Amino acid sequence: DDAGHPVSPTASVLGEAGPYVGELMALLPKLEVVFVLGAKALDGYMRVITASAPTRLLPVIAAPHPSARNAHAPAAARQRLINAALSVATHLEKAPEPRTVLR
């Protein structure tokens, strides 16, 4: 917000991000998997890829957002985040060619 506090993105903000996500994906032709953290990120990504016929489909792994708001999340949510990250790592380790990981 204007005071610098984190806020959840609204549907209009997610919609505005669509073209930028599309541009980013175009710049990453070797992208192999999409790892989204949080329900809003998943919603935003799905809005982008379903707004029109996608040029390519990628595996999507979603996990709870690891924000301070979720710091006291149940152990199951923390374990989901760990499992999702391990799934992405396993997926990338199995691919034959070297890759660049964006962080």
Image (cartoon, grey):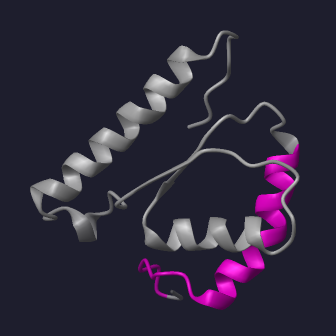
Residue 40, image x, y percentages:
50, 74
| x 80%, y 38%: residue | 28
Q: Is residue 56 above or below residue 98?
A: below
- Is 86 displayed left or right of 56 in the figure? left
Q: Is residue 70 above or below residue 80?
A: below
- Is 69 displayed left or right of 3 in the figure? left
Count of numbered labels shown in the rendering: 0
| x 51%, y 27%: residue | 91
Magenta span contains residue 64: no
- Which quadrant: the C terminus? top right
Q: Is residue 42 above or below residue 96?
A: below
Residue 16, image x, y percentages:
76, 80
Residue 33, image x, y percentages:
61, 39
**What secondary structure is the magenta-colored segment mainly?**
helix
| x 68%, y 18%: residue | 99
Magenta span contains residue 24: yes
- Is 3 displayed left or right of 50 in the figure? left
Question: Which picture quadrant has residue 53?
Answer: bottom right
Question: Which picture quadrant has residue 5?
Answer: bottom left
Magenta residues span 3-26
Which is nearer the eye, 28 or 80? 80
